[in-house]
Image: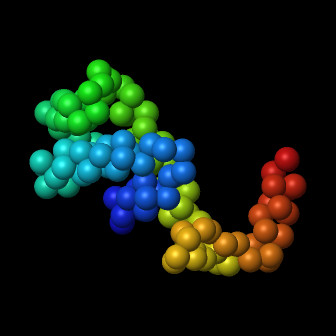
Amino acid sequence: MFLMKLEQEARTDSNGHMNKRKKLIELFDHAISMNKYTLKDPTALGRDYIVEQFNLAFNMNITYGFFKNKLDEFKKSYKMWKFLMKSTGISVDPETSMIYASPEWWDNHEAMQILLN
């Protein structure tokens, strides 16, 4: 599910980094599959694999720190998406992947923000 959402995000990216994002997602998936998906983060061997293959594919010289930050961003986006999908009044348009929130959901959300502040 995590990788499907990331792939969907890679397809809908509008700032021109689609190929790099997709490659990073594919490499991340392959790296964690090296351990049969028993770990949520790649091992040292997997990290080396991601860096080497990405740098070869795009003729770059990027360290794993860059990838770690990107992967953390992907995970954070996925957690927010997962939270929203469990909320009553939230749905996703299957064609555009846009998230829709009902007026009732917004009313409740805004009321909670007022109470918290």
The image position of residue 48, as x and y in percent, is: 18, 30
Which of 83/66 is in front? 66
Please state which of residues 103 and 57 is positioned toward the viewer in this rendering: 57
Residue located at (36% from left, 26% from top): 65
Residue 99 visible, this angle: yes
Task: Judge whether 6 appears above or below 103 on screen.
Answer: above
Coloring applied to the structure: rainbow
- The residue positioned 48% from the left and 44% from the top of the image is 16
Q: Is residue 43 visible?
A: no
Q: Residue at x 36, y 47 (%)?
A: 19
Q: Position of residue 95 (x, y in %)?
A: 52, 76
State the residue at coordinates (34%, 59%).
Answer: 3
In the displayed structure image, the side of residue 6 where residue 36 appears, left or right: left
Please tell me in which quadrant of the rendered image residue 102 appears: bottom right
Q: Position of residue 60 (x, y in %)?
A: 30, 25
Against 96, residue 28 (above or below) is above
**Count of picture labels:** 0
Front position in the image: 89 or 56: 56
Does residue 86 appear to the left or right of 31 in the view shown? right
Vertical relation: 106 (above or below) 11: below
Q: The N terminus appears in which quarter of the rendering?
A: bottom left
Q: Is residue 45 left or right of residue 76?
A: left
Please, is residue 69 above or below residue 88 in the view? above
State the image quarter where residue 103 is shown. bottom right
Residue 46 % position (x, y)? 18, 38
